[in-house]
Amino acid sequence: QVETYTKIGGTPYLDNQYTVFGEVESGLDVVEKIQNCETARNDRPKTDISMTVEVI
């Protein structure tokens, strides 16, 4: 896991605490922009990021 986090990123402090799953059908470039946004010391984005989520 550490290698994966190092290579593509992640939040290891959430391991074994939360289950997150989903699929990006389109717009992976947007995901990468979110991943690369500037964050504060608490790892929260400096500006809010809003998105629409569809639950099926």
Image (cartoon, rainbow, N blue to C red):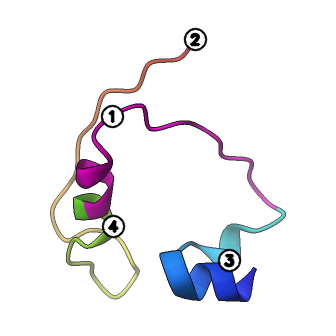
Q: Amino acid at mark 2?
A: Ile
Residue for point 15% across, 62% down: 47
Q: Amino acid at mark 1?
A: Ser
In this view, the residue farthest toward the right is: 16
Quadrant for the N terminus in the image: bottom right
Question: Do tag 2 and tag 1 residues touch (Cβ < 8 Å)?
Answer: no
Marks 1 and 3, the one that precedes in the sequence = 3
Secondary structure under tag 4 reads helix
Q: Specify the label residue 56 is tagged with.
A: 2
Residue for point 35% across, 70% down: 44
Residue for point 33% across, 34% down: 26
Secondary structure under tag 1 reads loop
Residue beneath disc 3: 13
Q: Is residue 50 magenta?
A: no
Secondary structure under tag 3 reads helix
Q: Nearer the viewer, residue 33 or 29?
A: 29
Left or right of residue 35: residue 30: left
Dot 3 alpha-carbon crowd within 10 angstroms: few under 14, some 14 to 19, many 20 or more: few
Q: Specify the label residue 26 is tagged with.
A: 1
Question: Do tag 2 and tag 4 residues touch (Cβ < 8 Å)?
Answer: no
Marks 2 and 3, the one that precedes in the sequence = 3
Marks 4 and 1, the one that precedes in the sequence = 1
| Up/down of 55 relative to 43, above or below | above
